[in-house]
Image (spheres, helix red, strand yellow):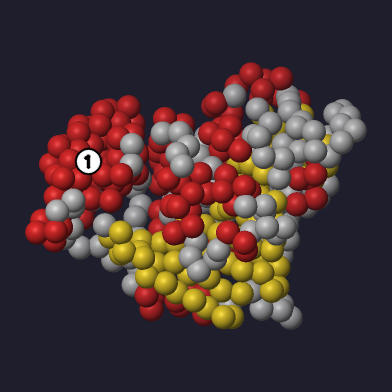
Amino acid sequence: MKLSLLPLLACPECRGDLLLAPDFPAPQSGDVEIDDVLLCCQGCGRHFPVIQEIPRMLPDNLMDTVRANYPDVFKKYAQYNIGAPRGQVSRHLADTRRTSRSFGYQWNVFSAMYEDWEENFKDYVQPLAPEFFKGRLGLDMGCGFGRHLYWAGTYGARMVGVDLSQAVLSAHRNTAHLPNVNVVQGDIYNLPLKDAAFDFGYSIGVLHHLPDPRGGFGRLVRKVRPGGAAFAWVYGVRRGPVEWLSVALRKITTRMPLRMLNVLCWIIAVILRIFSHYPYRVLSRFGPTKALAEKLPIKDHARYPFSVTVADAFDRLSVPLVQYYNEPEFRQWFEEEGLQDIRILRRFKNNESWRGVGIVPPRT
């Protein structure tokens, strides 16, 4: 992490300010990456490690996931009692941990960056345009392996990406060359960031996998200053044989070991390539057969590398929680938060989804 990130951080437990622990001298420049240090909360005295240049800012009941990945670090700093359980265990903790493991595995296996992701990002964030990002401070809530974080930073925003899972490793690797981007490991429901600190915040493809999507959106809005923009993209209602099959398979696949599920997804991707993607590429070239090509399932993946098809199959089948929304339900989130100038746009590529943006009003 860069020292310049510190003023934006807040303790996920007590909301206190963070400083470098006294035993760790500050670097001379705020833009220098710092690593293997501890951050200390000025409110409750908790300590949080910076590991592989990423601050691990999880609440007590989730810090054991970091401990399991980095036992040597916790042994080294044993006297600081990092992440010792002190509060109640959150609801839906088992699902939260499974989702975190799933996305952590997925986005470290499928972490390659492609040129296609730029058009993908611009499509997702409509009606926001690339010019919107320049010079603004933004939050990517649920940044995964950093493909959206990368483009927001490339367009000139000073960005902070937060993710619960080990996907933060890929996000940091994919954005390490951008001096205006930081990555933090944190929990959406206990975001380790100051309230009203950001010019904008977005969450793309994450909220519908949470145990409380509406609550997650509220956490995002809370981090955006008055006059700033809050944006989200969620699944719309899905129907048809592909969705019915996915629902049936998920009853089994969400209990499978992740490596075994990865093998299954490769098999599914091969089937889609043979029976959907290759036929689509041929049929879409000729006027008489274009209509038939458009009826093929998951046809949009025909233009992506094979690994993207595998990753999307994994995404569909690995997580235990998936929720879908219609336009009035999604709009209600924005209205309940009191957002202004609300714009909800329908997106339809393979399946219906919704993009929404609103402006945070002055707080009284």
Taking the spot 51% from the left edge, 44% from the top edge, the residue there is 147
Q: Quadrant of the N terminus?
A: top right
Q: Nearer the viewer, residue 64 or 361?
A: 361
Residue, disc 1: 252
Taking the spot 71% from the left edge, 68% from the top edge, the residue there is 225
- Measuring from the top left, give residue 202's x and y in whole percent: 55, 59
Q: Nearer the viewer, residue 311 or 112?
A: 112
- Measuring from the top left, give residue 63's x and y in whole percent: 59, 37
- Measuring from the top left, give residue 218's x and y in whole percent: 56, 66
Name the image quarter holding residue 345.
Answer: bottom left
Residue 277 seen in the current view: yes
Query: SS of the residue at dot 1?
Result: helix
Name the image quarter holding residue 176.
Answer: top right
> What is the total number of numbered labels drawn onto the structure image?
1
Q: Does residue 331 sit above or below 109 in this rendering?
A: below
Does 25 sit left or right of 246 as displayed? right
Taking the spot 45% from the left edge, 59% from the top edge, the residue there is 124
Q: Does residue 223 sit above or below 121 in this rendering?
A: below
Name the image quarter holding residue 194.
Answer: bottom right
Does 63 sit left or right of 325 as displayed? right
Q: Nearer the viewer, residue 200 or 132?
A: 132
